[in-house]
Image: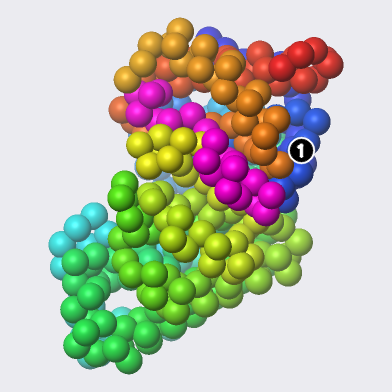
C-alpha cells in the first residue's frame, strides 16, 4: 500500500463522534470498503481470500488495511439476509406473499443459522484487531431490508392491503429475529465492537421507499428493540440509511439512534444535515460518493481539505468519509486521495496545527 497512516488508532474517537461529541482528532469512517479496492491497494487477492471457509489470512489483511489507512475502527457486519435463502432484496418477488408463506418461514431456526455463519468470521475479525482498534458494525440488515428480501419492495403494499394483520406480523417476526441475533452478537462478540449499526435504506433520491406510517408503526418499534439492547451493552447506535428520509428523521432520533450515516448531495448537501440535526446526533460521511467516483484525485484532495474542517467545526460529533461507501467501481487512486487528505488534517489536529 502506497500510503500508511502514522497516527496510532484509538477507537474512543469514533465513540465520541457517535455520541455527538468532538474528539481531539477527527475520526474517519466508511460503511464498507470493497474487498476489490482493498486488494488493489494492498496488492493481495483479498476477494478470493475472503471466500475461504476459514479466512484467517483474509481478515488479517482486512483489519490491517483499516489500521494502515488511518481508521480507528474496522467496519464489519454479518448480514441476516444471507441466512434467509433466495430473496428479493435486489428486486422481484420474494417467497412470502401470504399468511401461509409467512408461517412457513422457519423463524425459530434462523438465529442459529445466522450465528453458525457469522461466528467464525467475527472471531477472526476480532483476533486481528490492532491495539487501539475495535469494530463498527454488527448484525447487518435492518427490518425494512429483511422485509424487502422476503416479500419484495413492489409486493409489500399488496401484502399490506390484502392482509394487514400478516403485514404487521411480518415486521414483528423480523424484529424477533433481529433481537435474537443481536443478543447473540453482543453476548459473544460485544467486546470487539465499540459502535453498533445496521443499514436499512428507507429512501431514494426524492422520497421514502415506503409510507411514513410503515416506518413509524412497523419499523421503528423493531429498531427500538435493537437500540435498547445496544444501549444496555453500553454502546452507541449508528443508523446507515440512504435516501431522502427527512420526513421520518425526527421519529428515528426519538427512537434512540445516536448517529446517522449516508448522504448524497443530489438529495441535500451535508451542511443541511448538520444544520438540522447536529444538535441531537452525530453525523458521519460528508463527501459525496459520486464526486469520489467521477473526479480526479487532485480535486478530491482539495474538496476534503476544504470541506472537512467546515463540517468538523459546525457539527457536534463528526466522522469524515464518503456519503455511502467504497464499492468496487470507485477508483483506488481517488479513494487514496481522500485518505491522504484526511491524514493531513488529522496530523495537524494531533500536533496542534491549524485545520
State the count of labels.
Answer: 1
Give whichever of 337, 45 is nearer the camera.
Answer: 337
Residue at x 19%, y 58% (from the top left corner): 91
Give whichever of 42, 204 is nearer the camera.
Answer: 204
Mark 1 falls on what kind of element? loop
Which residue carries the number 1 mark?
22
Residue at x 40%, y 31% (from the top left corner): 289
The residue most toward the right is 352
Q: Say if the magenta span includes residue 67.
A: no
Quarter occupied by residue 14 = top right
Judge whether residue 302 can be spotted in this image. yes
* Position of residue 307 measured from the top left corner of the image (x, y, whole percent): 57, 23
Quarter occupied by residue 230 = bottom right
* Position of residue 239 measured from the top left corner of the image (x, y, whole percent): 54, 55
Q: Is residue 121 above or below residue 225?
A: above
Q: Which residue range is magenta in the image?
A: 271-293
Residue at x 31%, y 66% (from the top left corner): 210
Q: Is residue 124 left or right of residue 173?
A: right
Q: Say if the magenta span includes residue 278.
A: yes
The C terminus, quarter of image: top right
Residue at x 38%, y 11% (from the top left corner): 296
Quarter occupied by residue 318 = top right
* Position of residue 136 measured from the top left corner of the image (x, y, whole percent): 60, 47
Q: Is residue 12 above or below residue 308?
A: below
Give whichever of 155, 34 is nearer the camera.
Answer: 155
Mark 1, residues whose alpha carbon is within 10 Å: few (<14), some, or many (≥20)? Answer: many
Amino acid at each position: 500500500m502506497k500510503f500508511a497512516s502514522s497516527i496510532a488508532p484509538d477507537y474512543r474517537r469514533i465513540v465520541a463522534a457517535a455520541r455527538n461529541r468532538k474528539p481531539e482528532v477527527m475520526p474517519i469512517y466508511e460503511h464498507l470498503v470493497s474487498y476489490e479496492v482493498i486488494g488493489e491497494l494492498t496488492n493481495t487477492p483479498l476477494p478470493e481470500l475472503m471466500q475461504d471457509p476459514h479466512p484467517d489470512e483474509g481478515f488479517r489483511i482486512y483489519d490491517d488495511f483499516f489500521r494502515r489507512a488511518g481508521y480507528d475502527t474496522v467496519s464489519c457486519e454479518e448480514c441476516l439476509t444471507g441466512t434467509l435463502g433466495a430473496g428479493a432484496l435486489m428486486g422481484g418477488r420474494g417467497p412470502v406473499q401470504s399468511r401461509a408463506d409467512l408461517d412457513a418461514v422457519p423463524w425459530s431456526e434462523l438465529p442459529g443459522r445466522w450465528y453458525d455463519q457469522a461466528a467464525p468470521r467475527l472471531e477472526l475479525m476480532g483476533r486481528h484487531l490492532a491495539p487501539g482498534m475495535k469494530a463498527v458494525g454488527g448484525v447487518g440488515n435492518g427490518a425494512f431490508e429483511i422485509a424487502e428480501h422476503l416479500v419484495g419492495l413492489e409486493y409489500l403494499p399488496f401484502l399490506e392491503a390484502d392482509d394487514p394483520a400478516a403485514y404487521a406480523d411480518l415486521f414483528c417476526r423480523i424484529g424477533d429475529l433481529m433481537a435474537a441475533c443481536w443478543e447473540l452478537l453482543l453476548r459473544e462478540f460485544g467486546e470487539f465492537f465499540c459502535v453498533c449499526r445496521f443499514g436499512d435504506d428507507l429512501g431514494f433520491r426524492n422520497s421514502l421507499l415506503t409510507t411514513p406510517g410503515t416506518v413509524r408503526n412497523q419499523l421503528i418499534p423493531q429498531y427500538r428493540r435493537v437500540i435498547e439492547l445496544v444501549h444496555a451493552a453500553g454502546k452507541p447506535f449508528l443508523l446507515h440509511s440512504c435516501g431522502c428520509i427527512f420526513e421520518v428523521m425526527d421519529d428515528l432520533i426519538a427512537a434512540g439512534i445516536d448517529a446517522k450515516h449516508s448522504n448524497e448531495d443530489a438529495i441535500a448537501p451535508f451542511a443541511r444535515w448538520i444544520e438540522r440535526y447536529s444538535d441531537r446526533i452525530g453525523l458521519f460521511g460528508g463527501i459525496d460518493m459520486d464526486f469520489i467516483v467521477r473526479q480526479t484525485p487532485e480535486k478530491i484532495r482539495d474538496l476534503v481539505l476544504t470541506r472537512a474542517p467546515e463540517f468538523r467545526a459546525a457539527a457536534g460529533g463528526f466522522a469524515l468519509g464518503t456519503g455511502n461507501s467504497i464499492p468496487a467501481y470507485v477508483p483506488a487512486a481517488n479513494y487514496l486521495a481522500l485518505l491522504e487528505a484526511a491524514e493531513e488534517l488529522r496530523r495537524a489536529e494531533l500536533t496542534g496545527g491549524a485545520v
